Image: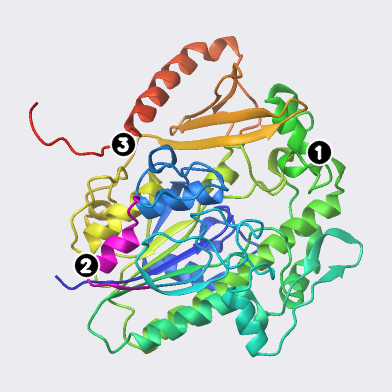
Amino acid sequence: MEHPNILWITTDQQRFDTLGCYGNKFVHTPNIDKLATSGVLFEQCYSNSTVCTPSRASFLTGRYPRTNRTRQNGQSIPNDEILVTKLLAAAGYTCGLAGKLHISACNPSISTTRERRINDGYTEFNWSHHPNRNWASDDYQHWLIEKDVQVKKRKVEGMPYIEYGPEEENHQTTWCAQKAINFIKNNADFENPWLFSVNMFDPHHPFDPPEAYLKRYIDMLDEIPLPNYRENELDEKPIFQQIDHDGAYGVKGLFPASKMSEKDHKILKAAYWAMVDLIDKQVGRIMNVLEETGQLENTIIIFMSDHGEMLGDHGIYLKGPHFYDPAVKVPFIISYPSKIRGNRRMKTMVELVDIAPTLLEASGQPCYTGMQGKSLWDLLINANVEHHRNDVYCEFYDDRRGDDGQRILATMLRTENYKLVIYHGMNDGELYDLDKDPDESSNCWNHPDYQSVKMKLFQRLHDRMLETIDPLPEKEAAW
């Protein structure tokens, strides 16, 4: 079997509806749209956590957050967890990375160098958690120093929630792409297959695109729609959503949707989309090099994000213990020109935890016993297979809101017709009838007509939670 190269592009905090191929008529994303045409676009791909570290640890291990013990930001993945990149490296792949990894605690108060690593399989490791100058060994900052560039952000007049970021040629997204381009060129003539993770920080907040990218949207600001928010809809929803309405993460004044004008909401969306446009431009550069070096046909290309962004929908910005589709549903496109028939859109539900076993099967490697995801390979190469999952599952652990700092532990189950969210220990939750209310505005948790539906979903969620039990250690004998 010929082993494919793997180009794995993962953005940070990018919601599903930010690309032309996902129906957005405002953004300029011709390169990612072209990738979707050449491959398979999944219309219902869901993250297994609404925040970075547990999501990334999950899709890299193929194991759910509670199983791989990396349940929240600020935790570090245990040394004995096995990443798919390590397994591929052991099988002969040369693995590289540019950008963030974030499967360990990553905070300057803990380390002034960079995040702790386990045996992750990456032999080339161009690390930059985010564009700010917080770590002495941040490779993006070294690149700026070599170019003799000092990045200075500038306020946008009359718009308090966004800034102009570095210009395109000095942007972290551009740096990530250039590192990928260098790696692809350098490995073009070697026999060993390769994997490269392009882990851009954008379109994660702060919202600071290059001025040239934002200007196009400022010129059409009147046309940009307001967030999906119905006045007073949070009255029937958990109290911490009302708290986050006044400030993301429960921090008053941090993107406070309740205090923003219509113009504020629109310019925030414009800045977010402008960051996506820059990502698309850099994806196009990488794709061109793949084609120029003759490696396109034998390369699996993935475009995805780790989780979404509320962007003012339901009166909330950023992320947290929120399971609305904008927070948990992500873009997911996979292309492999020599093996996968392109120009297809799959409606079946999939989870990010499914990616690791898919890559192992696609590269001819056995699935690691500890993985819990379900390979998508048969779905991708068999035209007669169109169904993968009946529901999707997501977890959130250990955030706090309110005067008493109440801990939030939550789980979500989404089917084609309903979404159930349970806030454990709170006697509170959310239930949405997605056929009647696709915007998830009306919480049916306490509605008398939905109690039998709720109980059935409870049982189904309980079954999914049992599936997260660690399959390791393996059974060795009958007794």
Rendered position, 243 above or below 371: above
Measured as percent of width and height from the top left, residue 203 is found at 63, 62
| Of the pair 74 and 31, the residue shown nearer to us | 74
Which residue is located at x 35 percent, y 88 percent? 293
Q: Classify mark 1: helix, strand or loop.
A: loop
Quadrant in the picture for residue 138: bottom right
Residue 375 visible here: yes
Q: Dividing the image into 4 quarters, which one contains the N terminus?
A: bottom left
Callout 3 amino acid: Asp
Which residue is located at x 53 percent, y 15 percent? 450
Q: Which residues are magenta?
A: 80-95
For mark 2, what is the residue? 91
For mark 1, what is the residue? 246
Q: Dividing the image into 4 quarters, which one contains the C terminus?
A: top left
Quadrant in the picture for residue 257: top right
Rendered position, 246 above or below 308: above
Badge nearest the viewer, 2 or 1? 2
Residue 435 visible here: no
Instruction: Name which of mark 2 and mark 1 comes first in the sequence.
Output: 2
Distance from disc 2 to disc 1, alpha carbons, whole Å, reads 50 Å
Distance from disc 2 to disc 3, alpha carbons, whole Å, reads 24 Å
Callout 2 amino acid: Ala
- Total labels: the figure holds 3
Callout 1 amino acid: Asp
Distance from disc 1 to disc 3, alpha carbons, whole Å, reads 39 Å
Badge 3 density bin: few <14, some 14–19, many ≥20, Cα 10 Å: some
Measured as percent of width and height from the top left, residue 137 is found at 58, 74
For mark 3, what is the residue? 470
Residue 110: say if magenta.
no
Q: Classify mark 2: helix, strand or loop.
A: loop
